[in-house]
Image (cartoon, rainbow, N blue to C red):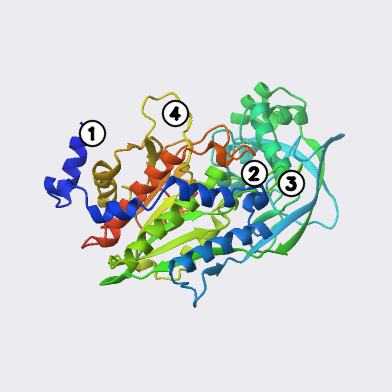
Amino acid sequence: MKKRFVLTGAMALGLSLSALAQNPVQVKYANTITADDLEEHLTFLASDEMKGRDTGSPEGLIAANYLADFYKELGLTGPVDGSYFQQVPLVSSKFEEVSLQIGRNKLVQNEDFVFTGDGDMKKKAKTDLVFLGLVNDENLAKVDVTDKLVGIWAVGERSNNLLNAVMGAGAAGVVIVSMEGQANFDRIANRYKTLSGRGRVGFDSPTSQRPIFMVSSDKMGELFGTSVEELKEAAKSNPESIKSQKATYQVVKSKTELEAYNVLGYLEGTDKKDEVLVISSHYDHVGVSSTGEVFNGADDDGSGTVSVMEIAEAFATAAKEGNRPRRSILFLNVTGEEKGLLGSQHYSENPIFPIANTVNNINIDMVGRIDYEYQEAENKDYVYVIGSEMLSTDLKKINEYNNITYTDLILDYRYDAEDDPNRFYYRSDHYNFAKFDIPVIFFFNGVHDDYHQVTDTVDKIEFPLMTKRAHLIFHTAWDLANRENRTRVDGTNTRGER
């Protein structure tokens, strides 16, 4: 049934059944992508010596130079005025001191609370902590939030709009519960603790006095001297029943400019060279823990980065042998993905090639492992595909056609649902192309126990499977780069802000 659907899609694109025969030229260059080469590159990029390739770190710059040198050796062009580097103007903001005291309870940062806001204060502020609960007009009419720290209950909600509403109503700051259960909060707090001291990386902007303190549901109950169940009930319609508490807090901030770059290798096309296909990955990871343990980032996203390298080599080899693609291809390795998709945001908003001429983005983020869903499966030859039919009815069909012709992987779309609770669509760099109505396709292997852990190491990569996934991506890219017409944009971006 599945293959019948794909064949129908292929014929809808004007392809006959006889066209399903493999193109020996494509196969020849796909076969230059080997497990040995992928492992060689990944062993370097995800080594302990690379210290987790943190954004703006010396090791991040070593990784950037490794990529640029590779593209230069392939004969690809540096498209940024002859350079392979696009500087990304980032700063590291460190909160040198964050203190919060409620009544006599002096809270410990990254144990009792996590600071997620902004601010810079010369002295401690004293006010009241009031309970608002759910953020709605009815509750705001019952609780005076002006110049107060405001306790809000945002479990299961997208909190940014709620925070804006409370701060817009005159609050001095917010203490927020966004998840129930101490264990859930502790996982976040432990991650913040592990990454503490490095600073919060982003684009420079004026400091806003926006102190936001995240606490667990249990801690919120403790601060107000009541049970979690009583808080949940009061949050709905009678928040004024919860007694306010005295509060003291302070936030002290400093900023440092970072040296960070996107790395670009460009292969010019032939008769359709003004149209550009972008193949992307992020080469940054999250560095070293506060205790010196290395987050190697072999799967996330060393696997995607070395896949882009090998796909680039396959296309460069083809070009040298007289099989240059019709469209141009930009191989783009971005920085700052782990800090909020920053490198791809900077490129998409400051493109080297016009966005209007960018025909597609193929994004590769984590393609080296087997996730929870397939660990016990008989057939583990799968890849998750996300975003491929939102903006173009062509792109998904093209990818499926190339899969049944060349690789026969299981193409799993379970995370492509708009209501996917994992929100994977919003969590990698294709997002910043799709927001400009560029049809995107995101290849992903799902999460596993080593995701964002110091155990994400090269020895756990499934190189034969990773190679097969890279072959599929190459074949789809070859098709997109050489077909007569660019993929139509006949869909609507229904997935808005992150």
Image quarter of residue 187: top right
Q: Secondary structure at mark 4?
A: helix
Q: CA distance from mark 1 to mark 3?
A: 48 Å
Three-letter amino acid code of the residue under disc 2: Phe
| Looking at the image, residue 78 lies above or below residue 449 | below
Task: Name the residue that disc number 1 marks.
Answer: 2
Residue 55 horizontal side relative to residue 19, left or right: right
Q: Position of residue 467 (x, y in %)?
A: 41, 44
| Looking at the image, residue 113 lies above or below residue 351 | above
In this rendering, the count of numbered labels is 4
Task: Name the residue that disc number 4 marks.
Answer: 373
Task: Name the residue that disc number 3 marks.
Answer: 196
Marks 2, 1: nearer the viewer: 2
Query: Badges 3 and 4: C-beta atoms under 8 Å apart?
Result: no
Crowding around mark 3 (Cα neighbors within 10 Å: few <14, some 14 to 19, many 20+) is: some
Three-letter amino acid code of the residue under disc 4: Glu
Give the residue at the far right of this rendering.
Answer: 104
Marks 4, 2: nearer the viewer: 2
Q: Secondary structure at mark 1?
A: helix
Say which residue appears at 70% left-offset and 53% top-offset.
118
